[in-house]
Image (cartoon, rainbow, N blue to C red):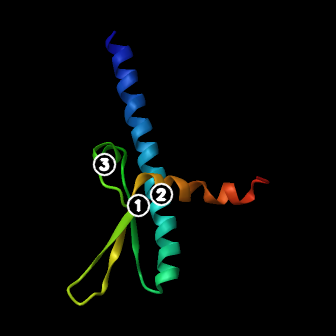
Amino acid sequence: MRRFLGIVVVAALGAAFVFHEQHSALEAELGVAATQLAQRPVHVHCQGFTGALLDATAEAGSVRFDANGKPGDTTDLKRPICDALSRFPHDVKSPA
């Protein structure tokens, strides 16, 4: 029984690590695209699973602005937006 529980814990930790790495890679790819569009270094943060469960707001994402109206260097995107952007390369190539 202990061995089985150990295997389950290791598998869960491994799956969490893989999802985290995929999430980080997507944020990096989106950051490169955002940097090219903004013509300055920009970072993208995608909402995590827990954040999506607790979120009750309607916007798709946000960028903070300072008192002078200058946009910040980070944008926060909701999970469905990041999921759609991660599928975009595949969707563009599909015949539909």
Identify the mark nearer the N-term, 1 or 2.
1
**Mark 1: which amino acid?**
Ala
Whether pointer 3 and pointer 2 mark residues with C-beta atoms closer than 8 Å, the reply is no
**Can the viewer see residue 10 in this picture?**
yes
Quadrant of the rendered image containing residue 60: bottom left
Numbered mark located on residue 60 in the image: 1
Where residue 85 sits: x, y (%)?
54, 59
Q: State the residue at coordinates (48%, 75%).
A: 34
The residue tagged 3 is 51
Q: How many marks?
A: 3
Q: Label 1, label 3: how many angstroms apart (C-alpha)?
A: 13 Å
The residue tagged 2 is 81
Q: Label 1, label 2: how many angstroms apart (C-alpha)?
A: 7 Å
Numbered mark located on residue 1 in the image: none
Graded by Cα atoms within 10 Å as few (under 14), some (14 to 19) or many (20 or more), the crowding at tag 3 reads few
Identify the mark nearer the N-term, 1 or 3.
3
Mark 1 against mark 3, which lies toward the viewer? Answer: 1
Q: Quadrant of the N terminus?
A: top left
Whether pointer 1 and pointer 3 mark residues with C-beta atoms closer than 8 Å, the reply is no
**Can the viewer see residue 76 in this picture?**
no
Graded by Cα atoms within 10 Å as few (under 14), some (14 to 19) or many (20 or more), the crowding at tag 2 reads some
Quadrant of the rendered image containing residue 13: top left
Whether pointer 1 and pointer 2 mark residues with C-beta atoms closer than 8 Å, the reply is yes
Where residue 62 sits: x, y (%)?
34, 68
Where residue 89 sits: x, y (%)?
65, 60
